[in-house]
Amino acid sequence: MKNGGISMKNEQTELNRFDSAIIAILAKDGRISITDLAKRIGLSKSPTQARLKRLEEAGVILGYRALLDPIRLGLDHVAFVEVRLNDTRDAALRAFNAAVIKVPEIEQAHMIASHFDYLLKVRTRSMTDYRRFLGDTISGLPHVASTSTYVAMEAVKETMLTDGT
């Protein structure tokens, strides 16, 4: 549901045990065949395909992708950036959100109820690259008034939703 351009994701889809099993299996193995998925959940192929299509259409399953190791790709500098905006009216929030979505170095962006407005997770190759990115990109995003950066020294836990709950 959209509210003035700000995404409001409060709608929950009812899941039965087969749906939950499909989600749990796909979260761990997105490349499993329909035949193998059907065997694992105890249904035939046709009802499994129908359930999978319904989960995709309902937006429970957003897509399928490869998980990449950012360290092996040379992207081992992670910074969390507090962003304060100079305007928090709806139009300003929409402009900021639209701009952030287009920036690949920003892995995550969360609107926060705090003394700042957004928390960004940014991944770059180095501190030098990050400093350039902060000055050229983050500071140039719509309505940015100020930022504070926290550099991660080590990722202790980074997981995606994998158990279907």
Image (cartoon, grey):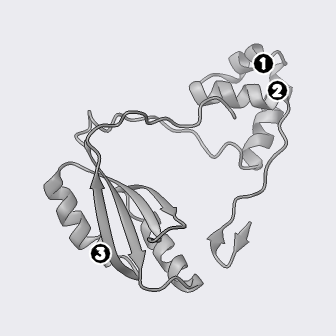
For disc 1, the marked residue is: 41
At mark 3, the secondary structure is: helix
Q: Determine the CA span between mark 2 and mark 3.
A: 47 Å
Q: Position of residue 31 (x, y in %)?
A: 57, 26
- Residue plotted at (30% across, 66% down): 148
Relative vertical location of residue 28 with respect to residue 4 in this rendering, above or below: above
- Image quadrant where residue 39 sits: top right
Circle 2 or circle 3, nearest the eye: 3
| Observer able to see residue 149 | yes
- Say which quadrant the N terminus sits in: bottom right
Q: Answer yes or no: do the residues labelled 2 and 1 have beta carbons within 8 Å?
A: yes
- Residue plotted at (76% across, 35% down): 52
- Say which quadrant the C terminus sits in: top right
| Observer able to see residue 30 | no
Q: Residues within 10 Å of mark 1 (few under 14, many from 20)?
A: some
For disc 3, the marked residue is: 139
Q: Determine the CA span between mark 1 and mark 3.
A: 49 Å
For disc 2, the marked residue is: 18
Q: Position of residue 91 (x, y in %)?
A: 56, 85
Upstream in sequence: badge 2 or badge 3: 2
Q: Amino acid at mark 3?
A: Ser
Relative vertical location of residue 46 with respect to residue 139 in this rendering, above or below: above
Count how many numbered circles sit on residues in the image: 3
Residue 51 falls left or right of residue 129: right
Q: Position of residue 163 (x, y in %)?
A: 64, 29
